[in-house]
Image: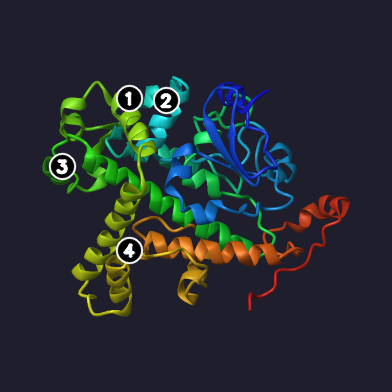
Amino acid sequence: MGIFESFVLGLRPVAGKTIGFQQNEGGSSSLLWSELELAESFQRLLSPVLLAEPWPTVPRVDCQQCRRVEEGLATWEVRCCDVVPVLPNFLVGEILHHHEHPVVLGWLQSRRSDPFAIWVPPNEAMEHKDARVDGRYGKGCPLLVEGGGLCSVYAQRPALCVNYHCYYPSMLWKEAWSCLGTLLELLQDAAAHFLVSLSDLDLGRLAQLWESEPPTLWEDGWQIEVLYEGCWQHWVGREAMFFRWCYEKLLSFGPKELQDVRDWHRQRCMDRLAVAGQEGTDHYRTLDEEFSHRHELQVVACEPPRELRKRLQSKVLGADEHLYSIHQMESYALWYREQLKKDENPSWWMFWRPARQEVAEKEGIAVTERVKEK
């Protein structure tokens, strides 16, 4: 069975071992980055320097043999996928390009999108959160194949889903994957906004509507009609066509447009610093210098600042949770990749549950108590 058939049937594609582009049986190309499969849209957005070598995948973590199910913390039908992700416009377009996905089309009919993304209504997000009891995963993501526990959009999954792992062998691995996830979140956000800026929507009207606080945008799981129509304007009723246009437009991007995406995000960071009265800070000057020399910039490995490393130890950072540029995050991701290549024998001291000692012993993994990161 090829990757395309796996996608249509909702099965997780079998990870390949070769690095590079692979043409699947359905005619669409997908990148097997080591064992990491990425959407075609992400292939276009990521720096070629990062794609030139494989990204080390987390060893001994396999969704086909889910550890959380073995530990009694999840059911086979849900596993760890109990969160509904936000889908940026270009990924919605990529999904619909390959398959008239009934769940995604249903979301479009339910007025839960705007030109930037398909969003998750607050009441639905709360339902999934409340379904977790005693650390156990509860209500499955609607994009899972019913009864199968496998993702129906795996080849086009967003940053949240690309990054998530139930276990990491050490804090270094946790940081590295959080860095990659943070980078993909930045690219999602910047590309989605940049694509909207290229459309024929009235951006001034759109900006005014989004000055409202998020809780006022929804009513019983639907966006308020006047807001919805104001956002979509003359595209109301043709939302799927708009998302397909976003995907096709992104694939047409050349070096200039990809640089424009990075410039858009860098300028946004500088504007946020200026509003906070931090134009004289070192970080602002770094971003300003980046902009001045943007055409000569190269992605080279650079160790992240200590402050950022501490934050990456706990989670992936959303696009609005930090002020690092895409170029900076790419340089940090490259540094982490180099460090992981040196970490040939991870100790698995993090996140391992002693209750599963027998599983560890069976696989020859040494289970140790958590030690303080030096």
Going from the N terminus, do you reach mark 4 or mark 2 first? 2
* Disc 3 target residue: 203
Instruction: Look at label 3 and name its amino acid.
Output: Leu
Instruction: Measure the alpha-carbon separation of dots 4 and 1.
Output: 35 Å
Residue at 33%, 55% in the rendered image? 262
The residue tagged with tag 2: helix, strand or loop? helix
Going from the N terminus, do you reach mark 3 or mark 2 first? 2
Please state if 109 lies on the left or on the right of 36 as rendered.
left
Regarding residue 314, the answer to whether it shows in the image is no
Going from the N terminus, do you reach mark 4 or mark 3 first? 3
- Asked if the residue at tag 3 contacts the one at tag 4, i.e. Cβ–Cβ closer than 8 Å, the answer is no
Instruction: Look at label 1 and name its amino acid.
Output: Ala
* Disc 1 target residue: 240
- Asked if the residue at tag 2 contacts the one at tag 4, i.e. Cβ–Cβ closer than 8 Å, the answer is no
- Asked if the residue at tag 1 contacts the one at tag 2, i.e. Cβ–Cβ closer than 8 Å, the answer is yes
* Disc 4 target residue: 294
Q: In the current view of this chain or complex, which residue is farthest to the front? A: 296
The relative height of residue 148 versus residue 74 in the rendered view (above or below) is above
- Asked if the residue at tag 1 contacts the one at tag 3, i.e. Cβ–Cβ closer than 8 Å, the answer is no
Instruction: Look at label 4 and name its amino acid.
Output: Arg
Instruction: Measure the alpha-carbon separation of dots 2 and 1.
Output: 8 Å
- Location of the C terminus by quadrant is bottom right
* Disc 2 target residue: 96
- Location of the N terminus by quadrant is top right
Where residue 141 sits in the image (x, y, percent)?
A: 51, 34
Instruction: Measure the alpha-carbon separation of dots 4 and 2.
Output: 34 Å
Q: Quadrant of residue 74?
A: top right
Instruction: Give the camera-side residue of 47 and 328.
Output: 47
